[in-house]
Image: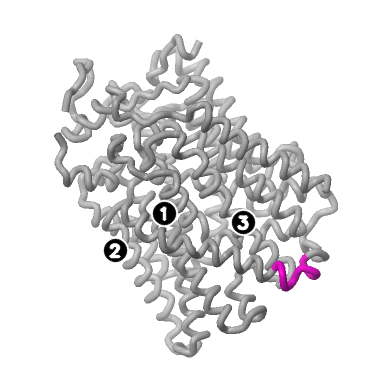
Amino acid sequence: MQRPQRDAALPESLPRELDERIAALESQGECGDDFDVTSLCWLFFLGVFIPIILLSIGWWA
Amino acid sequence: MRSAHAESTADESAWPLLRSERTWGPFRLAIALATAAAATWCYLIGEYAGYYLNFFQGSLALTAGSMVGMLLVLLAAGPTCIRFGIDSVASTKPQFGARGWIIPALMQFVSIIGWNSLLLIFFAKSLTQLLTVLGWFTPGVGSRLVIPMTTLIACAFVYVVLLRGASGITRISGFLVLHVFVGLWMLWLLVSRQWSALATAVPTMARPDALWNYTTGVEIGISSLLSWWAYIGAMIRMAPNGRTVAVPVMLGMGAPVPLLSMIGIAGVLVLKSSDPSNWLRTVGGPVYAVIALSFVAAANLGTAIAGIYASAVGLRNFRVIEKLPWRIVLLMTLAPVALVGILIPELFFASFGAFLAFIGVGFAPLCGIQIADYYLLRRRHVDIRAIFDASATGAYAFWAGFNPAAIIALGIGCAVYIYLLNPLTYVSHGPFRLMTASLPTAFASGFVYVSFSRWFVLPTGRGGYRRTEVD
């Protein structure tokens, strides 16, 4: 596994496999993607919009 | 290159998972989350809402509150867990520090172990009732031994399933998720047969202030779902990205709880009992009783499996436990549950609920702190190497490994919550009736965290904050 350049000041105390995993994540190739615009829209719809509608129905109906 | 063995056991550690190891798609994630979410506590949640609200309002308030609570949890722990394939506890290191994460770790451990002790004792009681209904067991004969024995058997079953790590959850959840549909059938049974009584039922503890009752229903939903913070990281880290996670979490984990809680609301309003294993025999005879008891047993077992897995992964963050064999970590996680079930099941039932109520208070400020840190202070930049660097020179070392901003914000958040709504007595103050308790608590904690960090932490250069991002 390719390892990127490391800051020499960091302590070298991590287990080898953990160090390899972190290096892979730091190279971005193995990193997962954060919420994108589509998923944030879904979160807003399901976590904000729908609750407001439900609460309005429950209160006014 | 890592070995095949290392890849196969990656989900048994607290180490970050690589994208290639995160194989759960939306459907598998939703099934696993639904299996974890649906359990006996849904009846208890519904029961509390049914004390204050009628069926219609209670169902809507709980559903709305649950979706809001799920959103808070997902925005708090979600991004870091999804990006780096780590669990909820590890995701708190940028806020609490390289040693301070022990605070949320203890909250997670006590919460999960406490709830799972309750669930497995519930499981044991349901199994005892089931055997009694089937005529295979006479009440009174050796009943003192039945609950400890069945708790032990349940623990052994959970242990065997989880020996395969997260894949054990997927294997069992494909079957156990059926209990969600049995629960919906029970709800339909109760609503269709008791509709006239349900439509006119009056909640027994409703107060004259209708807004207070309604807000309390919403708060019960929010605070119940906030407890999922302890579970969520261990599950969503198995998925590769945010898009895969968003909808399955909101619908798979956020929706089943209010849906099944309706059983509790309807039960307590009409039959004065939220637990279907108590009333389904009256409504539908012994066959229905057997189905209900099987449902309760399966539901609690599914949740316990997910909970013990999340707790075991959380324990892996401790250096001393990090290198222990997975089977030993599982035993360490299950041992407190088994001991409670064997030695003090009734005492635990009677008194531990109060303690858990206060533990639950801590999750609202925790979510507020994580959201404020990730989106406002760090602007989505987290250093994965620093998360696993426990040295004094690490970016998240703060002061001796602890970040005072997070500890103070957590303490103030807990105090704010208890002031707004005492979780034991339901005595409320201030803006509770307009804003709930969890939402202002999360906001207050986030505000205190950001203010204290800007005033005290950032000027010292500690915490790994990028100056340009904060400005």
Residue depicted at 48% across the width and 32% down the height: B407
Query: Which residue type carries mark 3?
Result: Leu
Q: Are marks 2 and 1 on the same chain?
A: yes
Q: Mark 1 points at which residue?
A: B307
Point 63% across, 49% down: residue: B221
Q: Which mark is residue B280?
A: none
- Spatial CA distance of label 1 from label 3 is 21 Å
Secondary structure category for the residue under label 3: helix
Q: In which chain is the residue bearing label 2? A: B
| x, y percent for residue B76 | 50, 34
* B460 displayed left or right of B228: left
Among the two numbered marks 2 and 1 on one chain, the one whose residue lies closer to the N terminus: 2
Within 10 Å of disc 1 (Cα), the crowding (few <14, some 14-19, many 20+) is many
Residues at marks 1 and 3, common chain? yes
Which circle's residue, 2 or 3, is located before the other in the chain?
A: 2
Mark closer to the chain start, 1 or 3:
3
Give, as a single range, the part of the protein colored magenta.
B191-198
Residue B56 locus on image (x, y percent): 75, 56
Type of residue at label 2?
Answer: Val
- Disc 3 target residue: B259
